[in-house]
Image (cartoon, helix red, strand yellow):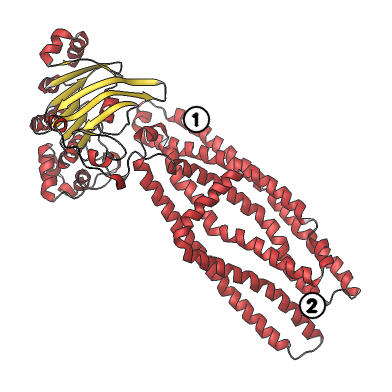
Amino acid sequence: MNSELSEFARGIISYLRPYKKWTILASGSLLVTVILDVIVGDLINRMIEKALSIDQELWVIIAILIGTVIIGVFTTYFSKYYSIRTATLTIKDLREVLVAKIPRVPLSYIEKQKSGDIASKLSNDTSLIENFLKNDLMNLLYQPLVFIAAFCYLLFINWKMLIVSVIIIPTFMFLANYISKFIGKSTETYQIRMGDVSAFVKESIDGMEVINTFNLQNHRIKNFEKSLNSSMDSFLKIERLRSLIPPISMVSQAVPYAITILYGGYLTLHNELNPGQLLAFIYLLKYLVRPPVTLPWLLSNLRQASSAFKRISEIIRLPEEWDEKKRTTMANDQEAANFSLMLDGVSYTYNDSNRVLNKIDLHVSANHMIAIVGPSGSGKSTLIKIMCGLYEPEEGTVKIFGTEFSKDTFAILREKVSFVPQETFLFPVSISENIRYGKLNASESEIMNAAQASNASDFIMEMENAFETKILENGVNLSGGQKQRIGVARALVRNSSIIVFDEPTSSLDKISEEYIQNSISQLRGSRTIVIVTHRLSTIMQADEIYVMDKGRIISRGSHEELLRSCKLYQQLCSSFA
């Protein structure tokens, strides 16, 4: 836990560094507030002395006391405002880092995570840190400082009464700190389980059609209740521990005050303490009692925030697949001119045990069309994702126009490849904006030409707002074929040299399938096309067909050649027909 706290401290300091000015102003105001709090106690002492001796300086001291309180009001305000401003800017930076990081993390990692857990880290965990920075960080500095200042002053007034008053406080501090350690451990468990709850909710929304169709509502509700009860048990465990702190705090405050009043009265009667010193002591005692009472709560919140930061750091520390600052130029050689896409000895393994691709060699000539076929689970989609740079091969090399995919070349090589997946994802923005995501600086004419080439312009123009029609979440206001054609338009507007299709018509009706097929046919000869498909007429158009089975390419050739030489291809064609 100590290493976790030190990591949290180093991490937060690095995020606070750009806002050094606001941090210094907040800390400076806090320090002045601490000094003024002790000065008020001293002025109370002097005021009582002057009042008892009927000294004319009494009104001067009263005026100074009022002025000190007014200044303290302003310093308290500035300390709070500057700390909240700093915390807000810091959390903004942290969230920006996370949002910028996730798209750069290898897809293979993201696919292994629960999307709800990632969302929980972005929302719940950052909120925990934000609450700590806004409400607890300055208090965590203030309480020890005011304790030290008040201790030193009261030590000067009467060291015997000070020792008697605070002798019991360390015991309560030890108990509260001991409890807070368990709170930190329980918080980490709770955050993980809340991530599971978020993931479950997202799955239920995304899979609503399946849930309703198969009457899985009760089954899902029972599973959700288990997940929710698990997170609730973790939360209640935290609250059971936190509930132990108030009774400890109450006793730790009451006992020192009782001792001070009794023993202070005794010392006053024996002329070892004057009434002004006793009242000042009682006033300042809160600054000795409150920190031990408050610090356990603050330490508990600190441990919660550090646990949240640990989970966030898991994302921040992930390796990035490419670095925008290290763009390189394309290779310029004969190999680049002859082949637009080259894979040599490519292998890939899921979860370090399940090898799905094994020593794949594949060379695609520029402006040629190849089709990849094979039974389910043969590794076709994985191979496609490696071609697009979405997965990094475990072994072997992938080259686009002679330039190998690497951390330094990912950005520029992806500009050469467009990808149309089995199911197109559309953002909840206008149709025009969705197409423009293929090329952010695309003109209106480029967008319209891409839509026309993908056979999407007719149905788009029939809509009330045409290209400005807003797509609802998950594209529920469009058919599957319409979504796929917009996806093809997005790929075309990019004007990439290579277009990769992964079963683009697998879930479409006959008419929508023909639209997509016509779009692909129009691209032949002008682009390099790689397609995974079950449509026989599309396969037959390919210049070369690759047959995959169990992660290997077992045969290649034209349609006629494979019909004569490859038994698996014969079986596949029969099933396609």
Q: Position of residue 76 (x, y in %)?
A: 57, 70
Q: Is residue 576 left or right of residue 250?
A: left
- Residue 222, numbered label: 1
Cα distance in 3D space between marks 2 and 1: 67 Å
Residue at 12% over, 21% down: 537
Disc on the earlier residue, 2 or 1? 1
Name the amino acid, label 1.
Lys
Q: Split into 4 quadrants, where in the image is the C terminus?
A: top left
Q: Position of residue 99 (x, y in %)?
A: 38, 47
Residue at 56% over, 70% down: 29
Q: Is residue 238 left or right of residue 568?
A: right
In the orientation shown, which residue stands out farthest toward the front?
333
Is 5 above or below relative to 557?
Answer: below
Name the amino acid, label 2.
Gly
Residue at 75% over, 91% down: 56
- Residue 276, numbered label: 2
The quadrant in which residue 28 appears is bottom right
Is 510 above or below relative to 18?
Answer: above
Helix, strand or loop at disc 1? helix
Q: Position of residue 568 (x, y in %)?
A: 22, 10
Crowding near pointer 2: few (<14 within 10 Å), some, many (20+)?
A: many
Q: How many marks?
A: 2
Q: Nearer the viewer, mark 2 or mark 1?
A: 2
Q: Using the rendered image of the protein, determine whether residue 541 is visible from the camera's viewpoint.
A: yes
Q: Using the rendered image of the protein, determine whether residue 457 is visible from the camera's viewpoint.
A: no
Helix, strand or loop at disc 2? helix
